[in-house]
Amino acid sequence: MPITIQVPFKVLPKETPWNEVCAWAIEKFGLPNFERYKFGNTNEYMEFIFQDEYDALMFQLYCGHGKRVNHQSEEEAMAQWL
């Protein structure tokens, strides 16, 4: 089951802007793909959907502001981006 981490734009400190969070994710996990993680965003938050529990935990610890969100399925999570 995929693990979803939401990172709200409003709570990111000035020292860690959204583009730094995305750059770190790419450096650590590679470009978003269907095997390791996916990325999407809304006006309020960025959403990272990880396939592996360890990857999700490492990302959440790095971010510090990310929260886990329980979706029933990956399709339900991605439907919010449309």
Image: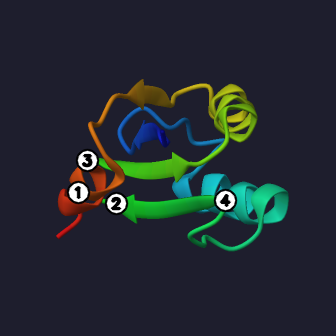
Task: Look at label 2 and name its amino acid.
Answer: Asn
Q: Are marks 1 and 3 in contact (CB under 8 Å)?
A: yes
The residue shown at (75%, 33%) is 54
Label 4 vs label 1, nearer the camera: 4
Label number found at residue 13 = none
- Alpha carbon separation for disc pair 1 and 3: 4 Å
| Residue 17, percent from left and from top | 57, 51
Q: Amino acid under label 3?
A: Glu
**Mark positioned earlier in the residue sequence (4 or 3):** 4
Comes first in the chain, label 2 or label 4: 4
Query: In the rendering, at what x and y percent does residue 18 appear?
Result: 53, 55
Q: Nearer the viewer, mark 2 or mark 4?
A: 4
Q: Is residue 55 left or right of residue 16?
A: right
- Is residue 36 shown above or below 12? below
Q: Nearer the viewer, mark 3 or mark 2?
A: 2
Closer-to-camera residue (34/6): 34
The mark closer to the camera, 4 or 3, is: 4
Residue placed under numbered mark 1 in the picture: 43
Q: Which element carries disc 2, helix, strand or loop?
A: strand
Q: Is residue 64 above or below residue 27?
A: above
Mark 4 to mark 1 CA distance (whole Å): 24 Å
Inter-mark Cα distance, 2 to 4 = 17 Å
Circle nearer the viewer, 2 or 1: 2
Kindly identify which residue carries mark 4: 36
* Residue occupied by mark 2: 41
Q: Which image quadrant is residue 78 in? A: bottom left
| Residue 34, percent from left and from top | 56, 69
Secondary structure beneath disc 1? loop
Mark 3, secondary structure of its residue: loop
Q: Which residue is mark 3?
A: 44
